[in-house]
Image: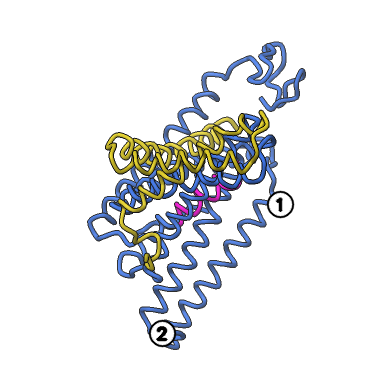
Chain colours: A blue, B yellow
Amino acid sequence: MTIVWPLQAGWVLDPLPPDLPIWLLSLGLEAMFIGAVVKATKQSGLWGELATFQRLFGVFGLAVGYFFSALALLSTSYAAYAAYLFLLFRTLEGAAAVQIYQRVLEFIKKGTVSGNVRSRLRYHLVTVFIAGVGLYLAIKVLTNGSIYRGFWTDLSLIYTIFVSVLTFLAVRWRLRHVTSDYNVGIVSGIALGVAGAQVYGFTLAENLLVFVGGSICYSLGFWVAAGFVFGIRLFGGSSECSSCSKDLSDYDNPSFCPQCGAKT
Amino acid sequence: MMVEPIIHWDPARLRQIGSVLAVVGVATLATKPLTDLGMSNRAALVVAGSLAVMAHYAYRTNYLFRESLSLLSAILAVVLPLLVCLHAFRVMVDT
């Protein structure tokens, strides 16, 4: 599920609570830093050797110190960081769109779809459910009047909360393949940051720039990914296994390397 | 006393807290060999704390120290999501 564009209620509604986007950006940044420092200490083998107080003051002290320093700089312009995260993720979404074409081609050729269909279905059902609840509440406000504090307040609240949640889920879903390579802190931090960027209260000019920039980044991501994917299909990929470098030219386009079992 | 949410704090104050915390963190990790050599945890914490006090002074007097940590944190804030997204891009293209 792609992230909803800022060309929606955000153009006429301010986020509510007004500080929520900034909190999401800040908490996302904090989670990223903690995740990165923990990962760095684990990869260096230091984590297991540290005493509890060393982890508390050392690792978390460093992570929180980074966070405060970054927040000092970002507080001068949250909009710039929000726009950066949004554009970065739009590029990734463009690349993800290529996979749809790949799956259609695969289905036409083989009659099956690869990947975990069950988890994909589960994810889409959850997002449809959440979007449905949000839509129901919005329609209820539009037809029956205010539920909570006022017509526009209610709509702003519904928009902000539901779009934040959906964006968080969408980013976590999009980065699911790399979660094991990093850690849940880094990936969740990025998800929180992008969610904050999605509902950030840009000015009209900033909204236009982000919208146009987002479309350009989406196209860029799509065509670069398509160039890689379909370029390999047209001109042939490497005849070596990327994991063990076994020569695969003797085999007829194998799906898995016969030596190490890695996907080709 | 600061009663505003952290996102509204004065940037100079945030930078100061950040630099002190980061130095405490680095000093605690850097004094790990001392605990391996037999120094007590409390003594190692005192060493780390004294380094934090020195960092606080350095922050107030040295412009380069003050700006370099902020710059490093900002670079991390930009580079981390970029690296993760590039990796995810590569995984998408490869699969």
Which chain is indicated by disc 1? A
Quadrant in which the C terminus of chain B appears? top right
Tell me the distance, in whole angstroms, between the alpha carbons under discs 2 and 1.
40 Å
Q: Which residue is mark 2?
A: A149
Q: Amino acid at mark 1?
A: Arg
Left or right: residue B14 compared with residue A243: left
Instruction: Note whether B39 is above or below B2 in the view shown.
Output: above
Q: Is residue A211 visible?
A: no
Q: Nearer the viewer, residue A222 or A26?
A: A26
Is residue A186 shown in magenta? yes
User: Residue A262 occupies which quadrant of the picture?
Assistant: top right
Compare residues A79 and A30 and report the one nearer the observer: A30
Left or right? Give the position of A81 relative to A264: left
**Residue stretch in magenta:** A183-195
Query: Which mark is nearer the camera, 2 or 1?
Result: 2
Helix, strand or loop: magenta stretch: helix
Q: Position of residue A102 (x, y in %)?
A: 57, 37
Which chain is indicated by disc 2? A
For label 1, the SS is: helix
Query: Residue A189 location in percent, x, y?
Result: 51, 50
The earlier-in-sequence mark between 2 and 1 is 1
The disc labelled 2 sits on which kind of residue?
A: Arg
Q: Nearer the viewer, residue A133 or A147?
A: A147
Please tell me the numbered disc located at residue A247: none
Q: Position of residue B44 (x, y in %)?
A: 58, 38
Circles 2 and 1 on the same subunit: yes
Residue drawn at point x = 66 percent, y = 45 percent: A52
Label number found at residue A118: 1
Q: Position of residue B83 (x, y in %)?
A: 48, 35
* Residue found at x 75% / y 24%: A261
